[in-house]
Image (cartoon, rainbow, N blue to C red):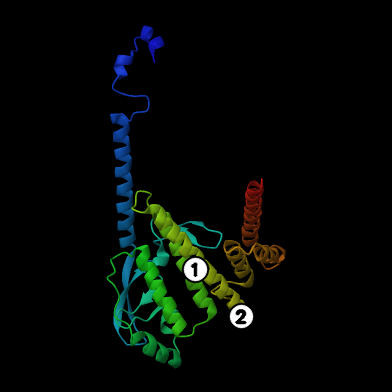
Amino acid sequence: MFKELEPMGLKDADIAEQSLFATGKAERAEKESDQELKEKAEKEAKEYEKDSLFDKKYECPICDNRFKERTVRTGKTRLLSTDTDLRHKYRAFDPIKYDIIVCPKCGYAAMGQRSFEGLSSLQRKLLREQVQANFKGLPPMGEIYTYDQAILRYKLALYSSIVKRSRASERAYMCLKIAWLFRSKSEDMKPTEEKYEEKQLKCKSEEKSYLEKAYKGFDAAVQSEMFPICGMDEMTFNYLYADLSRRTGNMEMAKKMLGMVLVSKSATSTLKEKARTLKEIIREEEDQKEQNQNKKLG
């Protein structure tokens, strides 16, 4: 193959043991080194996550049990980017895994201290009858939570939220956060994992299911609650509702809500820029859908 190079002193025999695309020792060593670096980075990320947490004390308003919960230290998270549905992506670890407070004795759970403690007498009664009376205990939790453990804790909080008849917006927001956790779990998976593709499909299916639940919940909330809803003013809510409409297949509603944001005098310039970006994404998705349909017909 390299006969023309022989006059220059380079012979086939010198590389006889290597085929054209074989992985040499240097390349193997480089790959092994890369793998070691990745494993080191993952270990450091877990150590950082562990060091970013502390045990905060709580007293359960249902059973008076005093317990501790893993809580993120102030200033330990760094925002990297934001998805179109306002999900924050952070460096090192995902702090929303630690937003739920769960009493390990009676099973009552809620998102955030204010929601956990702010109960009416009727809500306490309902929770004692329908949660505490049936709860059999939490599975073991480590120093840092996996995505599966975080999802389980959110589902416990969603269950308690339904029992105590909380506002539709509270339940919708929890469904949205569960969808985000499934997305994060999907992104965190390694292609080398067993049944990787099957797990990916399950995560995407669960994410879509909870996005649909959030969409329905926010639709109910806007008809019965006053702004701000889940800390969002009307235009921020409209933007989020537009993206949930897009993600659940209701493009016309998405465009309608984005139009309201873009012509609003109260919407910030940052929010309007997000709305323009989302409008372009919708246009591209509709064009792609039309092209795919034309291919099928052709």
User: Split into 4 quadrants, where in the image is the C terminus?
Assistant: top right
Does residue 131 sit above or below 211 in this rendering? below
Estimate the spatial distance between the alpha carbons at disc 1 and disc 2, rounded to whole Å. Answer: 24 Å
Q: In which quadrant will I find the N terminus? A: top left
Q: For this view, does 82 lie left or right of residue 259? A: left
**Secondary structure at numbered mark 1:** helix
Work out whether 144 lies above or below 57. above
Mark 2 neighbour density, 10 Å: few (under 14) some (14–19) many (20 or more):
few
For label 2, the residue is: 226
| Left or right: residue 15 compared with residue 186 | left
**Residue lying at the far front of the rendered structure:** 297
Q: Which residue is found at the position 38% from the left and 68% from the top?
A: 150
Judged left or right of residue 103, residue 254 is right
What amino acid does circle 1 point to?
Tyr
In the rendered image, residue 40, in percent from the top left (x then y), is placed at 30, 48
Residue 72 can be seen in this image: no
The spot of residue 272 in percent (x, y) is 65, 60
Badge 1 crowding class, 10 Å Cα cut-off, few under 14, some 14 to 19, many 20 or more, is: many
Q: Residue at x 44, y 76 (%)?
A: 158
Dot 2 falls on a residue whose secondary structure is loop
Circles 1, 2 touching at the beta carbon (< 8 Å) = no
Q: Position of residue 73 (x, y in %)?
A: 37, 66
Residue 210 is tagged as 1
* Vertical placement of residue 1 versus 207, above or below: above
User: How many labels were placed on the picture?
Assistant: 2
User: In front here: 64 or 74?
Assistant: 64
